Amino acid sequence: DRMPQEEPLHLFLDNFFTSTNLFEELSKRNILVTGTFRRDRVANCPLSSMKSAKRGDYEAYNTTDAAGGSIVFVRWKDNGEITLGSNCLGVQPLQTVKRWSKSEKKIVDVPAPAMVIEYNGSMGGTDVMDHAFSCNRPGIRSKKWWFPLFTFCLQSSMHNAYIVYKNTP
C-alpha cells in the first residue's frame, strides 16, 4: 500500500518467480508485470511445443485473469523455446534481433515479439548480478540447508550495496 502511484510500476521476473497466480494478484494491485515461465507453470494455456519450428516462429495466447485483466502468453523459438507472459505487453510490433546462424555462418536477423525485446532490455540487472555471482562464488560448503540461502542473501546485499555506491554521485 506504500508504493508510489504517480507512475506505474513494471516488474520483470525470471522463471524462478513467475506463476499465473502471481500475475493475477499483481494485476489486481495494478502492477504491470512481464516474465518468463517454466513449461509446467502455465496453467490452462494451450501453447504447443515448438521443437520443429524454425527460429523466430512464435505462438501467442490471450487469457483473462480472475481480476478481469488480460494476460498474454507467448512461446517464441530462439535457440530453444521461450515462454513469456505479460499483463501489459503483447506481440506487436514485431521487431528483429541479431543471432548467429551456424548453418549460414553469419549473423542473421530473427523476428521477435515486442514482449521479448522489452524483457531482454529490462532484465540486464539480473544478468549482471548472476554474472558477478558466478565470478565470485564463495567456496564454503555446509551440510546445513539454510547456509546456501544465507550466503546468497549476504552476497546479493553486498552486490546491491556496491551498485548503489557506484551509481551515487
Image (spheres, helix red, strand yellow):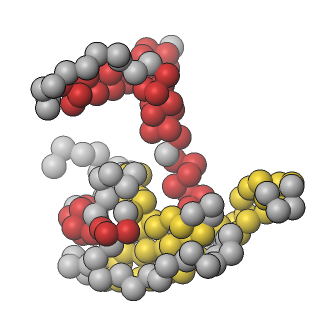
Pinpoint residue 137: horizontal percent, then vertical percent.
Answer: 40, 21
Q: Is residue 80 visible?
A: yes
- Taking 66 as reference, is 134 left or right? right
Pinpoint residue 38: horizontal percent, then vertical percent.
Answer: 37, 63
Q: Nearer the viewer, residue 63 or 32?
A: 63
- x 29%, y 83%: residue: 44
Residue 154, picture quadrant: top left
Q: 21 above or below 134?
A: below
Residue 58, picture quadrant: bottom right
- Taking 125 as reference, is 29 left or right? left
- x 28%, y 64%: residue: 19
Pinpoint residue 25: horizontal percent, then vertical percent.
Answer: 20, 64
- x 73%, y 65%: residue: 110
- x 37%, y 55%: residue: 15
Residue 104, picture quadrant: bottom right
Q: 71 above or below 1?
A: below
Pinpoint residue 134: horizontal percent, then vertical percent.
Answer: 46, 27
